[in-house]
Image (spheres, rainbow, N blue to C red):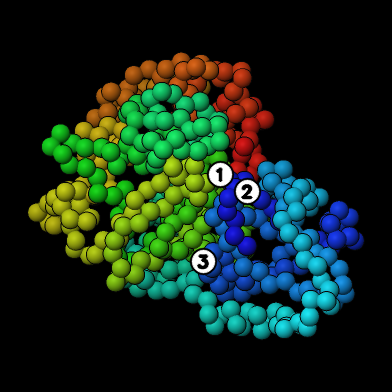
Amino acid sequence: MVHAGTNVEMVMAVFEAADDRCEDVDFSRPWPMKQVAADGIPFEQHWERDWLFSAPGYRLELLVQMPEEETTLCFLSGAASTSLTTEGVDLEDVGDYLLFSVKVTSDAGEATLSALPSDDSIDEQLASVARPTEWVGTVDGVDGVDVSCDSLDEGPLAETQQPVVMVHPVTVLQTEDYSKEPSAAGECDGESGHGGGGEVDPCTCPLPNLNCRNFGPRQAYETEDGRGYRNDRVLPAGSSERWDLSATDAHPYHIHINPFVVCPASSNKEAPFPHWRDTYFVQFDDLAANDFAPVSLLAEYASEFTGQFVFHCHKLNHEDEGMMEKIEVCAPGDVDCMCMDGETDTDGACVTASSGCYEGDTQCRYAEYLMSSFGPATLRDDPIPNTELSAEARNDLLGHDLEECCGDFPELGSESELIDYIAALTGIAPACCPDDLTTAWPPGHPCDDGGGPGGPGGP
C-alpha cells in the first residue's frame, strides 16, 4: 500500500461483504492482516493487524490470507481525524470510502499459494533479511556504544543529538510579510517554492518552520560580503545519533537517503517494537499521551557516504512552503563541511558550526535561543497570559545580544499577525484571542478552547 495523492491521514481495514458492491459490510469482523515491512524495509517480526493507519508518504507491506469460500473482500478507508483517537478506532467510521474490492472466486484459477506460512516461519524469514535495530557504533565521539532503543537512558544516547520541532500554521492567518500565501487548495503559485525568500520578522518563528526556521529565508540569506549558508544541519559520517521529534499539530516526517529506527512510544499507529522506516507521523495527541516526551529515532551514517540530502514534512504543500532542511553528512576532519566558512580555533574546533548562524542573522540566532530551552514541559505547561515579554525573557534575550527582539508583543486581531509558536516556546501568550479563531489553534495552545483540531492531522 502506498499513500499518495492526498494530504489526509487515513485508517484502513478489510471487511467481508455480502454483496459484490461492498454495500452490505460486517464492520464487527475486520479481516486479519500481517504487516511485514514499512516503507520498503522489512520488520524483524510480523505485526498482526485488523486496521491500518497511513499518513502521506507511508508505504505498508502486508500479507493477507484469502478466504476458502467464495466471497468479496472490501478494502475501506476513512479519515483518521474522525475514526481514530489515542484510545482506539471506530471501525464503522472506516467505511467512508471504498479503495478497492477483491472478488474471491474459483473462476480466478488455481491458487499459486494456498496458505500463508506459519507465524514462526514468517518471523524466521523476516529475521534472515531484516536490518538489525541495534548495533555498536560511535555516538558523540564515543566509540563502542550500544545503540538501541533500550539504551536511551544511559551514556551518550541519554541526550538527543538532533532535535526536530515541526510547526505549521494549521489555520493561522498569514501576513503579507510571510512570502507567498498558499492558495485555498494549499498549492504553490510557482513563485514561492520551498518557502520563498520573503521578509519575516526576525523575532518570530516564520510559518511554517522546523526548529523555528524556514527553508527559503535561510537559503536566501547572504552576508554583506556575499557569504551564505551551506546547510541547515550537519551529521558526522561513520557515527550514530538520536533524533527527538516533536510537533505542535501533526506532520509526517520524511528523510531521504538515511532511514531510521523508530523506538516504541505511546502510539497505536506504529508497531510496538523497534523497526526501520523513512517516514513517521509525529502528532501532538500522541505526544500528550506520553507526557509530551518526543518521539525518539536512531540513525546511523555510513562512513563511506558524504553529501547533502533533505528531510521534510511529507505533506508536500507544507514542504513547498518551507518545512524542510538541507542536511549534510561530513567526513571527519572536513572543516569546510562542518565549520561555518571553514573557520576553526587554535585547537582545530569549529568557531561556529556550519549549521549555526551568521552574527547578523537575527532570526537564526533567535531560533537558536528558543530551541536551546525547548523540552516536553514547553508543550505541557500552560503559557502565562501576557502581552509583553516577561522580565526574565527580556533579560535572556538581551544576554544573547538580541536587543531588537525585546519590544512589546503586538496586540492580536483577525487582520494582524497571529503569533502561536513563540507563545508555545517562550511561555508568552496573547492576553486575548479573536473570537472567530478560538477553535483554529492546535490542541494545547492557550487560544484553544477545546474545539480545536485535536484529531490526527488537524484540518
Q: Position of residue 211 (x, y in %)?
A: 40, 42
Say which amino acid is labelled 1.
Ala
Tell me the quarter of the image containing the N terminus. bottom right
Q: Position of residue 55 (x, y in %)?
A: 59, 52
Task: Compare residues 227 and 71 and report the one nearer the observer.
Answer: 71
Residue at 66%, 50% in the rendered image: 10
Per the image, the residue denoted by label 3 is 276
Residue at 29%, 71% in the rendered image: 304
Mark 3 → mark 1, Cα distance in angstroms = 20 Å
User: Label 2: how many residues lie within 10 Å, few (<14), some (14-19) or many (20+)?
Assistant: many
Tell me the quarter of the image containing the C terminus. top right
Per the image, the residue denoted by label 2 is 9
Relative height, residue 321 to residue 257 (above, below): above
Per the image, the residue denoted by label 1 is 250
Helix, strand or loop for disc 2: loop
Say which amino acid is labelled 2.
Glu
